[in-house]
Image: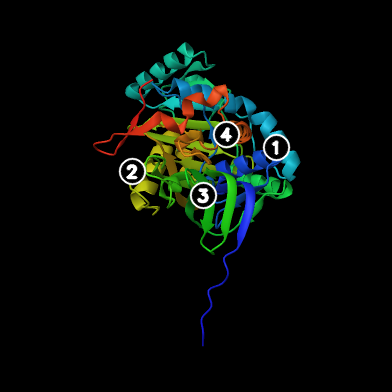
Amino acid sequence: MQSRTPPRTTRTTDVVVVGGGIIGLVTAWRAAQRGLSTAVVDPEPGGGAAQVAAGMLAAVTELHYGEQTLLALNVASAQRYPDFAAELTEASGRDLGYRACGTLAVALDSDDRAHLRELHALQQQSGLASEWLSGRECRRLEPMLAPGVRGGLRVDGDHQVDPRRLAAALLVACERAGVVFHRVWAERLTVTGDRATGVVLADGTALDAGQTVLAAGSLSGRLAGVPEGVLPPVRPVKGQVLRLTVPERYAPFLSRTVRAVVRGSHVYLVPRENGELVVGATSEELGWDTTVTAGGVYELLRDAHELVPGITELPLTETRAGLRPGSPDNAPLLGPTALPGLQLATGHYRNGVLLTPVTGDVMAHALTTGELPDEARGFTPERFVRDPLTQRFMEQPA
Ligand code: GLY
């Protein structure tokens, strides 16, 4: 019998987005709203790191030295969240679990307190609102906190959203806006002459596109066919996260996000209105490994228990590990690359959920004008160049 190769189909679209996580979906939604015919390629759209993330919108409490440019983008996105959540809820008919609950960052010993004092000073220099509280004041706000809490920072502007609901809502909003989904892997970028002209899918379909957006999270550096100098320098940074359930009789267990740095590791507890309590997260440079380990779970529970001893009473309902897309400067890579026709929306590292609204706006602008808006100029992928000798990425001198 003669075997036949199925005919290769070619489809054409204005924009193809490779990756259907929250960043790819928000890019596709905003592009479709601007009248661009848009397709998303992902075997499981709405999946990815958002299925693991806690959903803290922590522009102020996750401020780090040397990340002032990123801070401006984080704050811009946090400010857009209320309107973004309202618009997306309206467009999808889905609730996002957006909660303006605030955050309390606490210290358990004198080292932690010194670290928090420094963070407070940096926040004040940066014009951010946060208030120093004594241990007693912290416990008055959150009675479940351990008696040993030595002080803390009250940040009323750092809120939360439920990333799983966010992803589900974006998926519906995209479908309603006419985005076409290809539920397969993207096999390779097509380059014709000196331009990216779309992607070939694992099922053999060739998608021709005026603009291709690589938004595949930690996998963004792995798409075949992307020229070496353009391939984004993202790497996977593993995070293990636990989900506990607060039974009705214990509610309200915590009224806001509570976090701390314990023995140098971040631990946070994010209480949702539906009783879910998310405890995160480890930060591990282990390549593509997503195993949930006894050690990871132990450390999270140990540190969370030091903050809030009562968690040992709660059912442990889920353990999961995901991969953050880390970039060399911890900031995203947005917009046009050196290869015409190829844009990036990746490298969001610890801030993907927070940066979703502003990324959608930035990418819509970049896709319709070919340029980054002013607020995103610092995040051009072209800030990284390869060292010709080592082939390692280095930051472009300012
Ligand atoms: N932004 C929290 C985390 O990445 O763990």
| Left or right of 232 in this view: 344 | right
Disc 2 to disc 4: CB gap under 8 Å: no
Q: Report which residue position mark 2 lands on.
A: 285
The label shown at residue 34 is: 1
Q: Report which residue position mark 4 lands on.
A: 359
Local secondary structure at mark 3: helix
Q: In this view, does 187 lie above or below 195?
A: below
Q: Is residue 247 above or below residue 360?
A: below
Sequence-earlier tag: 2 or 4: 2
Numbered disc in front, either 2 or 4: 4
Q: Report which residue position mark 3 lands on.
A: 48
The number of discs equals 4
The quarter of the image holding the C terminus is: top left
Q: Which of these two is toward me, 160 or 185?
A: 185
Q: Residue 55: x percent and y percent?
A: 55, 38
The label shown at residue 301 is: none
Q: Distance between the residues labelled 2 and 4?
A: 25 Å
| Left or right of 289 in this view: 139 | right
- Give, as a three-letter code, the residue at label 3: Gly
Residue at position x 62%, y 24% from top? 79
Sequence-earlier tag: 4 or 3: 3
